[in-house]
Amino acid sequence: MDPVVFIQQHLIDPEVCIRCNTCEETCPVDAITHDDRNYVVDPAICNGCQACVSPCPTGSIDHWHPVPKAAAYSIEAQFGWDELPPKQALPALAQPLADAGAAPADDAPPQANAALSPTSARPPWSAAHPYLNLHTLKKPVQATVAGNFRLTAADAEGDIHHLVLDFGTQFFPLLEGQAIGIAPPGLDAGGKPHYLRMYSVASPRSGERDGYNNVALTIKRVTSDHDGQPVRGVASNYLCDLRKGDTVQVCGPFGDRFLMPNHDGSNLLMICTGTGAAPMRAMTEHRRRLMVAGKPVNARLMLFFGARRPEELPYFGPLTKLPASFIDTSLAFSRVPGQPRRYVQDLLRERAADVVELLRGDTCLYLCGLKGMETGVLEALADVCAAAGLDWPLLHRRLVDEGRFHVETY
Amino acid sequence: MSSIDYTDKIPNNVNLSEDRTLQRALEHWQPNYLNWWQDMGPDGSHGFDVYLRTATSTTPDGWAQFGHVKMPDYRWGIFLAQPEADRRIGFGDHRGEAAWQDVPGEHRANLRRIIVTQGDTEPASVEQQRHLGKTAPSQYDLRNLFQVNVEEGRHLWAMVYLLHKHFGRDGREEAEALLERRSGDQDNPRILGAFNEETPDWLAFYMFTYFTDRDGKFQLCALAESAFDPLSRTTRFMLTEEAHHMFVGESGVSRVIQRTCEVMKQTGLEDPAELRRHGVIDLPTIQRYLNFHYSVTIDLFGADQSSNAAIFYSSGLKGRYEEGKRADDHVLKGAHYKILDVRDGVLVEKEVPMLNALNEVLRDDYIRDSSAGVNRWNKVIEKAGLAFRLSVPHKAFNRHIGSFAGLRISPDGRVIGEIEWQANVPQWLASEEDRAYVASLMGRVVEPGKYANWIAPPPIGINKQPVDFEYVRFN
């Protein structure tokens, strides 16, 4: 059974909606549109931020249906509706997990739309309170580029950049795990403004440079699409080519779930590939600064990090300099000549004893990277738990319910 | 600045404390406003704790905060939507120029007139509805009425702010006059006709909030395009509040229809007289209420040809609905529009310059929008398996403004004589008898979770509260 195929699709009830346009006006990422009949949400754009929920005068906006990702209702299908379709019955395993995330009638907020597998609908209990949606597409802030560095080796195939943006005196507080939105300037081929791209922040709450009002992003230049066909990513190329002193329009902050715990003894189990390292870097750096400041959070950090080759691993250098007593790092490389391909799930299996020990304790798990990794990682977690006599489905569900299991893939 | 300053006497997000003169002027107006609310606000309600929505900021997470408050303590204030950086004028002769932060001298009189006309409707509707609280069909509906009332009051504040800030002494005098006119008063009535009609019962209230507040939506949308940026920002935030008012109307009528359909199905009855014996409002009566409110409301858009409308548009004061989504040149100098005319006793189309027909353009946009909601009401009837269908009458029916004023035209659009009109008008417009019957149903229901017999409970409560929540504490 494939555990990673469900999303909570955000839908509007056409029987209750009065077509007042408030949601479309409110949506910070322009995910909502309408025709003569219905107001609908584009599942490819909605990030589940819920900015539209409280302004809706009718309550029709607050519907979240678990559906297979591949069979999400298109906006064309939604235009034709007179009423919401019945909620679909899900396979036995996915049902309780997906429902645990949905439960909008209870106090739990619905799950974000972006993740493909069951993921917590709330942050861990000791997370800091995030600011949200301070700046929308219609009213972005202007940030200044303070630095733009290539992270990967000159001969590496992947071109990953470390971009530092400065907000000056503008109010833009961010937490590790939150994201910001950037719309590239200009118009697309259809003459419309480019849509908003979301980037996880790679720097901790106190700034990329401690005490400064700036933020770091990890950006990979997109030169081919998912099928390997050459394509020039509009936003990533725009960002990778920025020079110091250039200005960028930024929206956000976004995200109130993928946040780190702050209480004493809260362990972090971090699994990522490529630019999925950004939130892990932010969390690790926050904990590192606390340690240096003499206020350590007495907890374990464990990181599984995958890339094609060491030359393509962002932050490879600084990462290897962190003491093993602070963070337990395992690196997987899938394309080193002369060596077998190794993926993060292989390392999870190799380190099974330590992973299980961590999962038994007060630990939050974070998974970020290409969505292809999800299935393998979840299988590996299920396997190592089963081998150790730990009931993974039960534990997984508990982690999801308690805000301790966070997935962000793309 | 998006957060609202509640430490000031007058909550605002416009840095009011930095403009001492304006602050003093508005603080002088504030007690007069509160006196008006005491006299003309909802009758007998001043001691109730009402579960109301109050804005704490104009961003999505802040403008819908819920809690129980006494209405005279409601924090009426001045909230403008976020400014748009480098906003440009989107239409008319000044298209592409920077939006105005101050009133250009040559447009002063026209802008003042637009703002006063809009502002006058806000207290007027509170006055029209002030007795309805005595006959509310449920706590839920009573709360919705009060929410509409306090927000209409806030919309008055929005307009008065503009008058005080941008129109000097004239503006201050107009602001006082807004508190002096009275809906339905012989000597000093409200400016627009529909706002001097009574709102005698709850079906009329739902019809009013559905049809007449929707006129408000379209006027506000047109003003949100204005070159005068403070007016645009004010109306944009008002629109978010206005949405709730139309919700009250659309869902209210829908619930009346639903209840009638339930009884029709249970009893198998269709005859209005028999259904009335079961204490519900028969569908033909609902149709007659609809015909009345629809025709009175479309009069509010003004004469079908208007040189004022052309001037307002070309000078950038008032745009069209969704101006930004239209693909034309946004100047309209050579454009034409088809309007209706009467020739030799029949209605015919004639082409006129579009600039002069902008009232008609807005009216037609409104007609499309409001008809869509009527179709959604029909879905309720259809779901119950009944054959009856509601419809909006012809746009020339029962008009008192524009080229159809004084003519007799049937709901299906035929020009008819006075005799035919008189013979049929009881089937077309709510009669005294209809109104008396609906009035006879109006009894007060105050227990949480209880609903009057003639209306179905809502499918969902306010702010996700249950439908039997204590929305109003009577103390």
Image (spheres, coloured by chain):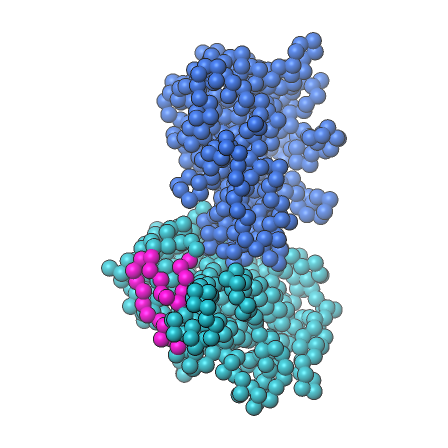
**For residue B349, which quarter of the picture?**
bottom right
Q: Quadrant of the C terminus of chain B?
A: bottom left
Q: Residue at x 61, y 86 (%)?
A: B416
Residue farthest left in this picture: B475
The residue that appears at 52% across and 52% down in the rendered structure is A13
Q: Which chain's colour is cyan?
A: B
Frontmost residue, B42 versus A113: A113
Vertical relation: B330 (above or below) B461: below
Is A152 on the left-hand or right-hand side of A20? right
Specify start and end residues of the magenta stretch as a single range: B437-458
**Image coords of residue A123 (percent x, y):** 44, 32
The color chain A is rendered in: blue
Q: Residue furthest front?
A: B268
Asked whether, in this view, residue A159 is left or right of residue A211, the answer is right
User: Can residue B401 be spotted in the picture?
Assistant: no
Most distant residue in the top direction: A338
> Where in the figure is residue B2, as x and y percent of width and height?
46, 48
Please count the marks in the image. 0
B121 versus A358 height, above or below: below
**Where in the figure is residue B244, as x and y percent of width and height?**
46, 59
Q: Is residue B338 visible?
A: yes
Q: Residue B255 sits in which quadrant?
A: bottom left
Residue at 70%, 71% (x, y): give it: B337
Q: Of helix, strand and loop, which mostly describes the magenta segment? A: loop
Residue A334 located within the stretch drawn in magenta = no
| B452 is within the stretch colored magenta | yes
Decide which of B118, A223 is in the foreground and name it.
A223
Of B138 and A335, nearer the camera is B138
